[in-house]
Image (cartoon, rainbow, N blue to C red):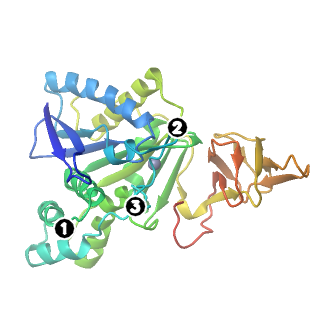
Amino acid sequence: MQRRDHPLPSRSLGTVRTLTSFHYGPPGGAKVYVQASLHADELPGMLVAHHLRERLAELEARDALRGEVVVVPVANPIGLSQWLLRSPIGRFELASGENFNRHYPALRDAVWARIEPSLGPDAQANAALVRAALRESVAQLTVESELEAQRRTLLALACDAEVVLDLHCDAEAVLHLYAGTPLWPQTEPLARHLGAQATLLATESGDQPFDEACSQIWWELAEKAGPARPIPLGCLSVTVELRGMADVGHAQARQDAQALVDFLTHRGLVAGEAPPLPPLPYPATPLAGSMPVTAPVSGVLAWHRAPGDWVREGELIVDVIDPISGQVTPLASATDGLLYARENLRFVTAGTRLAKVAGQEARRTGKLLGA
Ligand SMILES: [Zn+2]
């Protein structure tokens, strides 16, 4: 194992923050990248990364890693240091207002310019060209802030990996995944090993989150290059939502870390025989079919349904109660589907998204992710 520290440019006199990556297994071949807590205070991923590192150290000691596995257990030191009146602010950078998991640079044109003259009929050779061009393009990105430097550092560590796992969590939720639509066949074994109760698929979810910055370029380049110069889907990049903010515990984290090792074994990146694939709890659904339940008024929440519940269109999910007027506003699901996440606050302002239901039918357009 090798530890590497990546200092970020100082934002303010007298302070320097650092990203730290841990590298297991032989470099130079297949590569896996796992990062935790890009939204700083989404902590289940940090504990899973902690247990995953223990497992990787064991696997490395008995020479069972067939490629390099890079782990960044704390992916957002900027966000982790942001506190306001005793509350953590991990989702948005206070200085710019930007979401830490948006606005990753789109590298398609830069990579295309580098690879286009050299592409040929061999898909694996073309994939190697793409990876080299990605490394060069990311290295040449100019950055003007600590936040941009954090994004570039994470992307530099991830961009040439064949598997990228970005560990997040929701407010209160069952385990669910976000991935690119063309990646579903590769994602399904991961969904089974993790017991993902929903997988939300999109080819473009809006504002370029980290997972899409890693994977989308592959199907875009493949389309540009055409069938005579085949480019494979060379990066399986998945956002893994490890349940809710408070779901941080050793037993669960150990089990999740083992599920990730089982998945890597299934892919041949860890030596040995993978355990049989568990059943898929719920089919993948379009991200455009994930229907929010939104509060039209402010009030106190009283839930009728919980994450993991299957609900019907029109079925009561939650009441919003105004204890001054006595008004009770019942809110129903807009679709049949699995209620996979809900708000963890119990008092909300008007316009708050309270819950998300994974329906089969794509009904939404435009930017598909929340703020
Ligand atoms: Zn997140």
In the rendered image, residue 87, in percent from the top left (x then y), is placed at: 52, 40
Q: Which residue is mark 2?
A: 245
9 relative to 35 in the view: left or right:
left
- Is residue 266 toward the left or the right of residue 101 in the image? left
Q: Residue at x 46, y 51 (%)?
A: 91
Q: Position of residue 235 (x, y in %)?
A: 28, 55
Q: Which residue does the numbered mark 3 point to in the structure image?
A: 102
**Residue denoted by label 1:** 142
Q: Earlier in the sequence, mark 3 or mark 2?
A: 3
- Local packing at callout 2 (Cα closer than 10 Å; few below 14, some 14-19, many 20+) is some
Residue under the point 63% across and 52% down: 356
- Labels 3 and 2 touching (C-beta < 8 A): no
Quadrant of the rendering where the N terminus is positioned: top left
Closer to the observer: label 3 or label 1? 1
Residue flagged by tag 2: what amino acid is it? Met
* Ligand 1 under 8 Å from disc 3 Cβ: no
**Residue 123 makes an appearance in the image:** no
> Which is nearer the eye, 103 or 222?
103
Give the amino acid at mark 3.
Arg
Question: Is label 2 in contact with label 1 (beta carbons under 8 Å)?
Answer: no
Q: How many marks?
A: 3
Q: Does dot 1 land on a helix, a strand or a loop?
A: loop
